[in-house]
Amino acid sequence: MRATGVSVSHATLYPIVDGIGDFVTIRGRTDERTSITVGIMNAAGKRVRGIGLGTRLGAYSTTWNGRTSSGTIVPDGPYTVVQTLTDQRGNRMVVSSPLTVSSKRLVRLIDIQVRDGVDYDREGTEGFGLVIDRDSDKSVHVYGNQGADWAFVSYEFTLPSARTYRTVRFEVMGEAQAGRTGALLALLDTSGEQVAEVKTGTANARYAVTAGATAVNSRRVFATVTANGSDLGALRVFSVRLVTTYEVFR
């Protein structure tokens, strides 16, 4: 007999209904008329659910939601999905696929990480640009001076492990130097590439810049604060905060 793609859609099933991983798709394709049955076996080899698909030709699929035929959720643990295919001549193909059932559910959490301005990971200057630590209040003075001069400080964060990230947002608290229009730029990176830029500044006033990465393709994220001389950039960074809303199974 001939059959291809006999498999299950994913390796873990979360039967608690929350829209994520609530069922698995059991599937395959036959090139001739074939009788198909599916058995779900627990670790002891006992069948906890049986599904008969009748005789099929071509692509076929069915789903299992982690419940017995009476609707009871099966206990957590390892299971095996056994597909038995029998053609019109009595030839059989048996394909077993491992499957884990977990009663964990998807929950949404918020992670907040705060760094003092002076607690940066990298710094850089050009021309007469300056980076000056102020230990008295844990801030850093980033001074672009004039013209093409510039300075920057960069903060690296590690995102919590998650199934999905809903929002990743930086909040930079700064203060422009008196008499200058100070420019505060938050460059938000996930892998060294700029994905967002925020620019603002008011002399003699504290302000916050908030922005979020457009995509997360790495758990390492960066906020780079830059003062450009051409923007009359001279500012102090008091703190950088990363606020992450994310989803995990628990």
Image: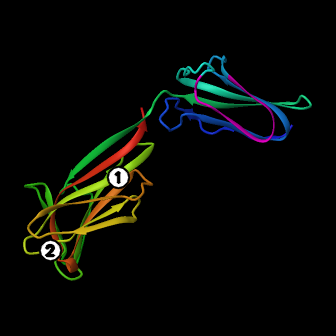
Question: Do we see residue 160 in this rendering?
Answer: no
Q: Residues within 10 Å of mark 1 (few under 14, many from 20)?
A: many
Residue 240 occupies quadrant: bottom left
Q: Which mark is residue 181?
A: 2
Along the line of sight, the residue nearer the viewer: 100 or 13:
13
The way the protein has been coloured in the rendering is: rainbow
Residue at 45% from the left image edge and 32% from the top image edge: 105
Residue 228 occupies quadrant: bottom left
- The residue at which mark 1 appears reads as 168
The residue lying furthest to the bottom in this view is 147
| Rendered position, 35 above or below 160 | above
Residue at 61% from the left image edge and 21% from the top image edge: 68
Residue at 30% from the left image edge and 43% from the top image edge: 111
Along the line of sight, the residue nearer the viewer: 236 or 63:
63
Residue type pointed to by label 1? Val
- As measured in the structure, the alpha-carbon distance from the residue carrying label 1 to the one carrying label 2 is 28 Å
- Residue 115 at x, y percent in the picture: 22, 51
Residue at 57% from the left image edge and 29% from the top image edge: 100
